[in-house]
Image (spheres, rainbow, N blue to C red):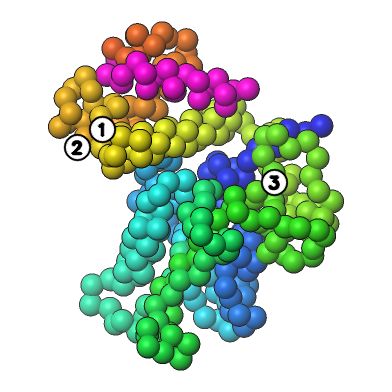
Amino acid sequence: MSRYLDPKADVVFKKIFGDHPHLLISFLNAVLPLTPDRQIVSLTYLPNEYIPKIPALKRTIADVRCIDKEGRVFIVEMQINWTDSFKNRLLFETSQAYVKQLEIGEEYHLLQPVYGLGLVNTIFDRESPEWYHHYQLVNVEKPVREIIEGLQLVFIELPKFEAHGASDDIRMLWLRFMREVNQKTMQVSPELLAIPAIHEAVDLSEQAAYTPGEMMAYEQYWDAVSIEKTFKHDAYTKGLSEGEARGRAEGEARGRAEGEAQGITTGIENTLRAIELLRSGQSIDAVSAKTSIARDVLEKLCLSIAKNAS
């Protein structure tokens, strides 16, 4: 049996949707709140030179400029998120995408609508069974009649999403692909394979399609996700912010002030360096000396690496 990789990992998502625009068109038409006349017919990928290379810092998967059936243009920014800051993160990045459309002196009427799509792999609204959340700017006194369409956000809680019984709903089938296909999958549902675009995406998820370098990036992605979850847990149990937890854990040897100030940026780079050192067979003591990361954090990291490897 083929072994599949999880499409929620950025290296897999980008191989599927970053190299095959027709698959991304199918996916976006399915999951975005687009009316029939707004269905995407073509798209172009926007430059991503501003996206950090370290996945734990910003999980932007792709930024695209879309053209719909009526020739109208809009922009979509996609992210896969794992931590509690995802709402502010997507709002910030989507707002940036809206603002950066104009050069200095250009007219505001040239601005095109921007959608932010967040695939959230955690449950954030535990009081509601709803898994699809659509936000837009409205007049609070007349929310149905007066809508500002320039900026819209969509969050999909993947863990909460469940499809019951057979369905030919393309939205449900694409989200089933995102949720069900992973490294534990031995056989993919025939319902998914019956849709040509999803069948192609499944084929692109097979481990055999990835180079050793891509597989290393895949493993590092999940290590980074585990690290973020650890910091989130530590912050919650100790009453700290996520940045403070990361700063305290990684900045212990260099001093609390410096560690907390640099926790979010250099801290993650330091942790990813520790991952490479641990994978190369170096001891926890040696890695701690080289990175100034506390032993207890490195021990958790070793467990995460071993778990992902298995």
> Which amino acid, mark 2?
Ala
Number of residue marks: 3
Q: Which residue is mark 3?
A: 180
| Disc 2, SS | helix
Residue 248: percent from the left, percent from the top? 25, 29
Q: Are marks 2 and 1 in contact (CB under 8 Å)?
A: yes
- Residue at x-position 49% and y-position 76%: 73
**Secondary structure, magenta segment, majority class:** helix
- Range shown magenta: 290-310
Q: Which mark is residue 261?
A: 2
> What's the CA distance linking mark 1 and mark 3?
35 Å
The answer, for residue 17, to whether it is visible in the render is no
- Front residue (pair 227, 129): 129
Horizontal side, residue 117 vs residue 183: left or right = left
Q: Earlier in the sequence, mark 1 or mark 3?
A: 3
Relative image position of residue 49 (x, y in whole percent) = 37, 50
Report if residue 31 is visible in the image: yes
Q: Residue at position x 62%, y 45% from top? A: 7
Q: Specify the label residue 247 is tagged with.
A: 1
Task: Classify mark 1: helix, strand or loop.
Answer: helix
Q: Considering only vertical position in the picture, is 99 above or below 237?
A: below
Q: Residue at x 36, y 69 (%)?
A: 98
What crowding class fits label 3: few (fewer than 14 Cα within 10 Å), some (14-19), or many (20 or more)? some
Q: Give how far apart the Cα atoms at labels 2 and 1 are.
A: 7 Å
Pointer 1 local density, CA inside 10 Å: few below 14, some 14–19, many at least 20: many
Can you say which quadrant of the picture contains the C terminus?
Answer: top right
Residue type indicated by callout 3? Glu
Q: Earlier in the sequence, mark 2 or mark 3?
A: 3
